[in-house]
Amino acid sequence: EVQLVQSGAEMKKPGESLKISCATSGYNFTTQWIGWVRQMPGKGLEFMGLIYPGDSHMRYRPSFQGQVTISADKSVSIAYLHWLNLKASDTAVYYCALSGLTLGGCFHIWGQGTLVTVSS
Amino acid sequence: SYELTQPPSVSVPPGKTTSITCGGSDIETKSVHWYQQKPGQAPVLVIYYDSDRPSGIPERFSGSKSGNTATLTISRVEVGDEADYYCQVWDTTSDYVVFGGGTKLTVL
């Protein structure tokens, strides 16, 4: 069974750094794109970016480029979302989701979400 | 940037059929996917590639596309279908995923 299990909720202060994770199992980690999706409180889904763990090829939505870093560790089949300098506006639930073998597909499996709260 | 337009809300009595639309320029050239999200839960794929249904999704859920509009149709609506629904495409011009703004389905 394919599973994406995300790390737990985080409470951080503005200016701090954070890395959240998405642990995968049940499929070949290097052959499917994994995406990250933000959902701010009471709002809709926003695509952030995708990574292909096989060669670390990435696609970012322009508004997130430079604000976050997406990475993947093939040795442990985990994808990451990393912030260097959190802002209060980063408060949201973040989902990882499996996108398949090629770009342009759907997100067919989702993680359970990680709530990130940034407050002074 | 590419935009998908959904109605903010739709209401339907139990047992009836309802449709949720997703409008976008040249959407007929793109593959449309639909997600259901219940409160406090992660989204679930309910329709992919315009009209295919993942295993485990009831046949009551169907998808179609015509002109500049994709449509998710739910027949014999149940109280358990109450959720937010999002459409999604891959925009080949900007080369990234685009979600619609979401539609809140209320069953009353």
Image: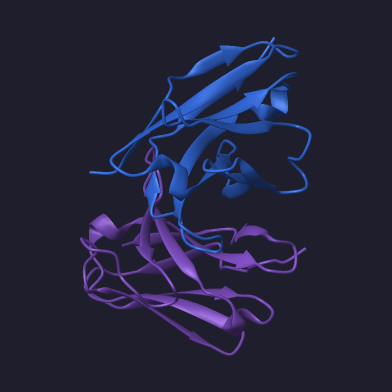
**Depth check, front residue: A93 or A106:** A106
Q: Position of residue A30 (x, y in %)?
A: 46, 43
Q: How many marks?
A: 0
Q: Is residue A77 left or right of residue A62?
A: left
Q: Residue at x 68, y 31 (%)?
A: A69
- The vertical placement of A118 against A109, above or below, is above
**Depth check, front residue: A51 or A43:** A51
- The vertical placement of A80 against B63, above or below, is above
Q: Residue at x 57, y 36 (%)?
A: A41
Q: Residue at x 63, y 25 (%)?
A: A82
Q: Position of residue B46 (x, y in %)?
A: 35, 63
Report the quarter where the N terminus of chain A lies: top left
Q: Position of residue B63 (x, y in %)?
A: 39, 77
Residue B91: which quarter of the image?
bottom right
Report the quarter where the C terminus of chain A lies: top right
Image colour for chain A is blue
**Depth check, front residue: B12 or B36:** B36
**Depth check, front residue: A21 or A54:** A54
- The vertical placement of B12 against B41, above or below, is below
Image colour for chain B is purple
Q: Is residue A21 left or right of residue B83?
A: right
Q: Is residue A78 left or right of residue B54?
A: right
